Image: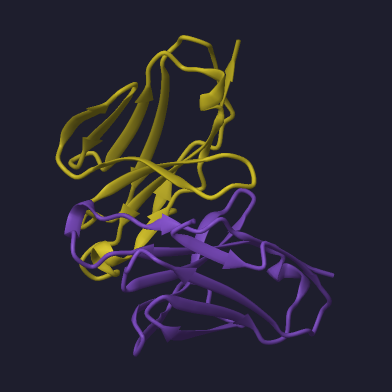
Amino acid sequence: QKEVEQNSGPLSVPEGAIASLNCTYSDQGSQSFFWYRQYSGKSPELIMFIYSNGDKEDGRFTAQLNKASQYVSLLIRDSQPSDSATYLCAVTGGKFSGGYNKLIFGAGTRLAVHP
Amino acid sequence: DADVTQTPRNRITKTGKRIMLECSQTKGHDRMYWYRQDPGLGLRLIYYSFDVKDINKGEISDGYSVSRQAQAKFSLSLESAIPNQTALYFCATRSSSGGLADTQYFGPGTRLTVL
């Protein structure tokens, strides 16, 4: 089992729709969770972070965390073609695997927003 | 100017050659990281450093070495490059002061091709 799992996609959504990206993680000790967006050939850029159970909203983006289910998701409302990118889920290591000084990345989900 | 810079941005080399990739940052962060990214595999940690005297191996350190010349500089060397080291390499930095919310900030990447 991979430490951080994401569906590779592509996830195809029409412009204006809600895109839902999911991520599961294996280390129960992980405390912080991050979503990065990466355009092809570019570096990852942080979109959101979350560390408390529940929802966190920032503009069109909502991160959701459920530590009991070891599940984190990212919702993108009113999706735009410019949102087309790969979205990387990253979690901090547990107590015995680096803690918050290390990030463990999923392989990413490719999102395609079509007009 | 970018906070995290990497040189070179692109490099083509031959099997057996020694290669050095350099990373510099102006963010004042003490944590620095080297990752490689391969299609479908996400970002994998090669080495990380908490300060000039504290260097640690990541999950895929074989075939690589690093040097932390100063707080702001962290170099990655491939002692004898081989074709399966062809990848996109990223440097990242992180502050040690923020705890749960602090994330890693990435440089623009170096695309390395080993023939």
Task: Please give the name of the residue rendered at 79% of the width and 84% of the height, measured from the top-left corner.
Answer: B16
Image coordinates of residue B45 in percent, x first then y, are 47, 67
Left or right of B20? Residue A107 is left
Q: How many marks?
A: 0
Residue A75's image quarter?
Answer: top left
Q: Is residue B103 above or below residue A49?
A: below
User: Which of these two is toward me, B35 or A95?
Assistant: B35
Task: Please give the name of the residue rendered at 39% of the width and 84% of the height, measured from the top-left corner.
Answer: B55
Task: Please give the name of the residue rendered at 57% of the width and 53% of the height, measured from the top-left corner.
Answer: B41
Q: Is residue B18 above or below residue B97?
A: below
Image coordinates of residue B91 in percent, x first then y, are 50, 65
Task: Please give the name of the residue rendered at 42% of the width and 13% of the height, measured from the top-left corner.
Answer: A78
Judging by colour alone, the chain drawn in purple in this rendered image is: B
Color of chain A here?
Answer: yellow
Residue A76's image quarter?
Answer: top left
User: Which of these two is toward me, A61 or B61?
Assistant: A61
Image coordinates of residue A80 in percent, x first then y, are 51, 17
Image coordinates of residue B30 in percent, x first then y, are 31, 73
Outermost front residue = B1
Q: Is residue A8 above or below residue A102?
A: above
Residue A113's image quarter?
Answer: top right
